[in-house]
Image (tube, rainbow, N blue to C red):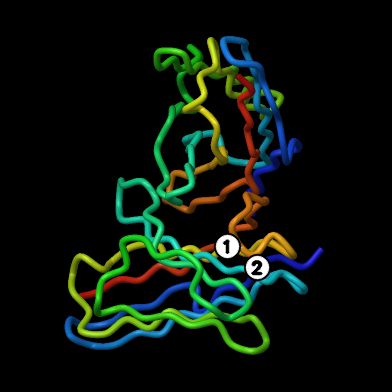
């Protein structure tokens, strides 16, 4: 079974600085999708960014980008120019080709003014 | 290490039937969350319980109810099932401890229950 590991339960960053959240996963599949979700206090899950495993180019969404290392099975999220509104729980997730989903345990990001 | 257990893993129901999904949190975890993820959609937070009391409520339909029992396991009861209820239902558990269920701690997700409504 696939597992997703987020090794940083908590991270903090100064406003306007850059922070990287780590995620590794274990799979024997070659075709899959990876996601980062943001969960604010409302508990709503908001998609931040997604990456298809067959794409070598790292996904980017405005201030959010990923470093996808397929061979190393690593999928880190970089948040540039951090804003106070970025403070939340961040979940890394894996979806297999047959739509089986696995989530990491989350990283709590604090943004200091 | 023990993980979150969900049962059943797969469930097929007809429209207007009822379904009960079960979640067994990691031992000593006091908080349970339920999420629904429809095909091609992001997970939607449904409801959470801390120490057997409802702590947060999300987009849970009135046809659904949930509770957390004295042994901390939780059940999601779904009635008058509709085709649109077909989804993956995830349970996650965490240890909120003395923070009263409002702090942000790691949530350990179960493997999910895949519900198909025909």
Q: Total number of numbered labels?
A: 2
Q: Are marks 1 and 2 in contact (CB under 8 Å)?
A: yes
Quadrant assignment, res A5: top right
The answer as to whether the residues below labels 1 and 2 share one chain is yes
Badge 2: residue crowd in 10 Å (few <14, some 14–19, many ≥20): many
- In terms of secondary structure, where does tag 2 sit? loop
Using residue A11 as the reference point, say whether residue B23 is left or right of it: left
Furthest residue to the right?
A: B1
Using residue A60 as the reference point, say whether residue B81 is left or right of it: left
Location of mark 2 (residue): B4
* Residue at image point 40% right, 65% down: B57
- Seen from the viewer's position, the closer of residues B99 and A54 is B99
* Residue at image point 59% right, 17% down: A67
Furthest residue to the front?
A: A113
Protein chain holding label 2: B
Rendering coords of residue B105 (x, y %): 67, 51
Q: Quadrant of the N terminus of chain A?
A: bottom right
Kindly identify which numbered label has been placed on residue B92. 1
Earlier in the chain: of badge 1 and badge 2, it is 2
């Amino acid at each position: 079974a696939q597992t997703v590991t987020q090794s940083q339960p908590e991270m903090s960053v100064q406003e306007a600085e850059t922070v990287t959240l780590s995620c590794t996963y274990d799979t024997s599949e070659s075709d899959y999708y990876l996601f980062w979700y943001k969960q604010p206090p409302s508990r709503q899950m908001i998609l931040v960014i997604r990456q298809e495993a067959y794409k070598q180019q790292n996904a980017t969404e405005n201030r959010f980008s990923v470093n996808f290392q397929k061979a190393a099975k690593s999928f880190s999220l970089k948040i540039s120019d951090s804003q106070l509104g970025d403070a939340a729980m961040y979940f890394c997730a894996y979806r297999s080709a047959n739509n089986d989903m696995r989530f990491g345990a989350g990283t709590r990001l604090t943004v200091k003014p | 290490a023990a993980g979150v257990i969900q049962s059943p893993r797969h469930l097929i129901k007809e429209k207007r039937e009822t379904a009960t999904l079960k979640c067994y949190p990691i031992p000593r975890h006091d908080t349970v969350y339920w999420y629904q993820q429809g095909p091609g959609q992001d997970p939607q937070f449904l409801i959470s319980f801390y120490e057997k009391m409802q702590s947060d409520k999300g987009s849970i339909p009135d046809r659904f109810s949930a509770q957390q029992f004295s042994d901390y396991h939780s059940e999601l009861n779904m009635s008058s099932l509709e085709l649109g209820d077909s989804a993956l239902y995830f349970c996650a558990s965490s240890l909120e401890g003395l923070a009263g269920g409002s702090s942000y701690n790691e949530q350990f997700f179960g493997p999910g229950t895949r519900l198909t409504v025909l």
